[in-house]
Amino acid sequence: MFPKIGILGGGQLGRMFIQSAMNWNVEVHILDPDPEAPCKDIATSFRVGNLTDEDAVYQFAKDLDVITIEIENVSVSALEKLQAEGKKIYPQPEVIRIIQDKRTQKQFYQQHQIPTADFRLIENATQLKDHLDFLPAFQKLGSGGYDGRGVIKLEDEFHLDRAFDAPSILEKLTDVWTEISVIIARNPKGEIAVFPPVEMVFNPEYNLVDYLLAPAQISHETLQKAEQLARQVITAFDMVGILAIEMFLTSTGELLVNEVAPRPHNSGHQSIEANFTSQYEQHLRAILDLPLGDTQIRSYSAMVNLLGEKDCEGEAIYQGLEEAIAQKGVFVHLYGKKYTKPFRKMGHITILDNDLGKLREKVKWAKDKVKVIAVGI
Amino acid sequence: MFPKIGILGGGQLGRMFIQSAMNWNVEVHILDPDPEAPCKDIATSFRVGNLTDEDAVYQFAKDLDVITIEIENVSVSALEKLQAEGKKIYPQPEVIRIIQDKRTQKQFYQQHQIPTADFRLIENATQLKDHLDFLPAFQKLGSGGYDGRGVIKLEDEFHLDRAFDAPSILEKLTDVWTEISVIIARNPKGEIAVFPPVEMVFNPEYNLVDYLLAPAQISHETLQKAEQLARQVITAFDMVGILAIEMFLTSTGELLVNEVAPRPHNSGHQSIEANFTSQYEQHLRAILDLPLGDTQIRSYSAMVNLLGEKDCEGEAIYQGLEEAIAQKGVFVHLYGKKYTKPFRKMGHITILDNDLGKLREKVKWAKDKVKVIAVGI
């Protein structure tokens, strides 16, 4: 009944997308380099292959109808070839090409008058000494960064020895009051639907979302500005699918686009239980050219990432799950990963509570109690 | 981390159970006679075999840890053998044995002072003429009835030629004001959790749930009585797992147990979106001896069965889905069945709306608009 979907990448985002697609009997085929990827047992078909290998991607996708991604680091040339042959590729290859390099992504914002933190383009570590006036700043790798990797803070010239020696950007340190994420969807008809912004709290030790609160506790005016900015961004990209837009809210109330992900995103997991439509179903609707779903919240919520404990590597064990699920409004999602590593995303917990105080207490409780450790540690 | 679960039966109930079990990485293995059963692509393993064949059931289950069912018509002797070897069988074989025959089920209610409609035991059609004083009545087959089959109304002696010639019960026609269903769960520790009763509307033409409203619009007193009765029933069975208890509410306010199903049930589908815990996750919790989940509703809801249209047989086509999913609070579930038959359960629609009037309007709309027909018809 529906077209056959292929996803480049078979991690937790693909897994939750498949869980959603199952409700409508939609076939979802997966390509992933890891034979033990989270999608392997639940995809309609699962193929092992390198996502940046043009031939592997082409061979995987040539008999499918709609191709999407759950990671940006894929062979865009294969997608362009498939698009030229009439396949629907959402997000479009040209969007992925811009986004997969933080340098072209930043230049895109500049060209489209999309507010973003000041930056400079850097080709290698040596060039950094010409930009000492720009420190303190974040150095971000142009490509290859993922899940907290590829970002480093350079306070002053004495930090230069830790810098990346690769094409990158130097991004001016901004006075960030809070970080929010706005997830927005657009279908081929051009219909747009925006999820209420969420507020992300990052762990200072590793550059990953620790937990989030939804919706973000920001003024109505800022909320409207954020939604408007999200519309501007997805329209500038002219893209189809889900786009997660991470924004800095500065202490002066300014919104700056930090970076975007043209796919379901860590900052939208809670939508499975907390919104009328989840980000996964919304992406499915968008790429199948169906009417977009209602994005309204059904409840205030929080989402806590279950990351592998710092010093643990090996077969995963989950502590505190039984206590967690004994509580009302607590939803546990594990991603089917057998092995844990420090800070590996192993699952998440969604917490629903319309009392914001209690919600924050439950977040604290969950962060203290639920741990992913390794066998024998 | 969790024990390996096996389910006898791989239809839509097994499918929705697996969708829920995925969130916790629980392995679910399936045995079903139909190689195209709804669970085939999403189970950890899928084996084709007859559920009433003792050896097939035993061979399927002997390397698993916890065995459950999604249909009562299974080899109880195989389950008894497995239980004797230390497997956990929930619901327990002795419970399935009582329930799988409506005759022993009715006698069980009688023995345990559980209110139920008056009945007589019938061995064959010839005996019916000794019970003309008991008509009008329903004749219900002792075993083998399922999904609306195996029940016939006998108004008077002129109806006897349509009677079943098999062991059955003759059940006194009751003055039914409405039919409700109470889903209750019990874990091995004896903890019990009751879902709020739902109100079922049956289609007069075929004996299947047409739609339901949750929670049932009954007085607080009746609601409490229904929940109390449900506790009495699951305790009398001493069972572990989910038990769906269908009750008649008579015009005089009496509650009579009609029949029970010791498994997830059609009358609990809406719990996926409408309650804090779904019936599927609750069954999972119960049979894994985990704390039971909160059964409270998150919203008023309705559930409309998507049944194959009367005159349609063949490859299924779904009409009106796009219009349905365009509406807020409408959730479509298709069961992955390629072929439709008259009244075959092909999917369901859950509708959330806290305005009961609008909820009823949306039910009417969905029943009118969404249809399952066959290719070429």
Image (cartoon, coloured by chain):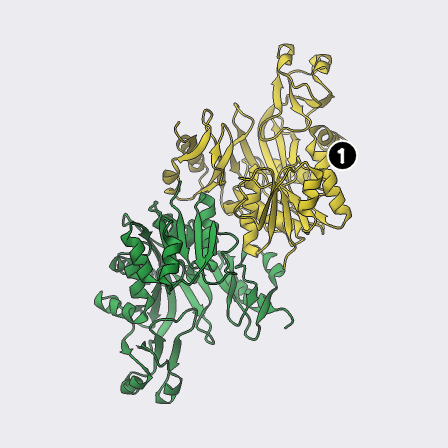
Chain colours: A green, B yellow
The answer to whether residue A296 shows anywhere in this view is no
User: Image quarter for residue A367?
Assistant: bottom right
Specify whether residue A375 is in view: yes
Pinpoint residue A59: horizontal percent, then vertical percent.
38, 55
Q: Please give the chain letter of the residue carrying mark 1.
A: B
Q: Position of residue A258 (x, y in %)?
A: 33, 69
Quadrant where the N terminus of chain B lies? bottom right
Q: Which residue is mark 1?
A: B112
Q: Position of residue A122 (x, y in %)?
A: 29, 79
Image position, residue B57 (x, y; %): 68, 42
Up the image or down, B313 lies above or below A358; here it is: above
Q: How many marks?
A: 1
- Residue A366 lies, with reference to residue A192, above or below; the image says below
Q: Nearer the viewer, residue B144 or A77?
A: A77
Residue in the picture at 37% in, 72% down: A177
Measuring 58% from the left and 26% from the top, which residue is drawn there? Answer: B177
Quadrant containing the C terminus of chain B is: top left
